[in-house]
Image (cartoon, grey):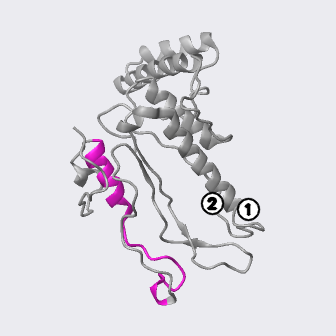
Amino acid sequence: MLRGTNPAVAVNNIADFQVRDAKSSDMFESMYSHSVDTVLSGTGKETFEAVKMLKAIQSAKYAPEGGATYPGGRFGQSMQQIARLIKANVGVEVAFADIGGWDTHFNQMGQRASQGPLATQLNELGQGLAAFYKDLGDRMADVAVVTMSEFGRTAKENGTRGTDHGHANVMFVIGGPVRGGQVYGRWPGLDQSQLYDGRDLAITTDFRRVLGEAVDRHLGNHALNQVFPGFDNQPGKFLKYLG
């Protein structure tokens, strides 16, 4: 996924992306720079430049704007770091953050719908997205956020008060270029005859259709046949044209 003509560096955490010992850092940087392998020396140069840039960002004090309060945990931290990088104007084009814990096979809900593992996960997701939106303020005019999951849940509860692996789910798209306030796509229904294999919500929209429009209209890359080879890419209408 990170292979291509443009250099890319994978960063899990800004604070951890560094060689903590200055002497060791200088030694490693020298080793890479003097390598006869052009790919190795080039990659080393890009990596250490990224380390220095992120270290400078990390050392600066940061306070979220707009009264934003990020939730505790890895997801909130990730969303705050993405906001921080965007504000630092370091050239971020695409960023990714994940949130786990959706495998709710048992005791999915507590005594109320607002309680239990699923409610906790949804609350963390919602708080993280809301804080990110508030924190970026006017910068959200140039930002599009897309949420997705690699699997859904069954339409019906199982024998242990949970749900098992399913197929279709929902995707949210947030940001300035989004024609928001509505649901796109066709609702397939929850009648037994409408469920996929009699157990799952039926899929009506391929996720590549959604991501393809973000790549085409927001990132400006119209070569969707290279991004999603073999897929009939037809960008829809939920994003405005920027330009």
- Of the residues tagged 2 and 1, which is closer to the observer? 1
Q: Which three-letter amino acid code belongs to the residue tagged 1?
A: Gly
**CA gap, disc 2 and disc 1:** 12 Å
Label 2 crowd bin: few (<14), some (14–19), many (20+), radius 10 Å: some
Label 1 crowd bin: few (<14), some (14–19), many (20+), radius 10 Å: some
Residue at the image point whose x is 40% and y is 31% from the top: 92
Element type at mark 1? loop
Relative to 196, 117 lies left or right: right
Residue at the image point whose x is 62% and y is 53% from the top: 100
Element type at mark 2? loop
Relative to 159, 217 lies left or right: left
| 231 or 62, nearer to the observer | 62
Q: Position of residue 162 (x, y in %)?
A: 69, 72
Give the labeled residue for mark 1.
116
125 lies above or below 150? above
Q: Position of residue 83 (x, y in %)?
A: 50, 32
Per the rendered image, the range of residues in magenta is 193-219
Q: Position of residue 187 (x, y in %)?
A: 41, 74
- Residue 205 painted magenta: yes
* Total marks in image: 2
Give the labeled residue for mark 2.
102
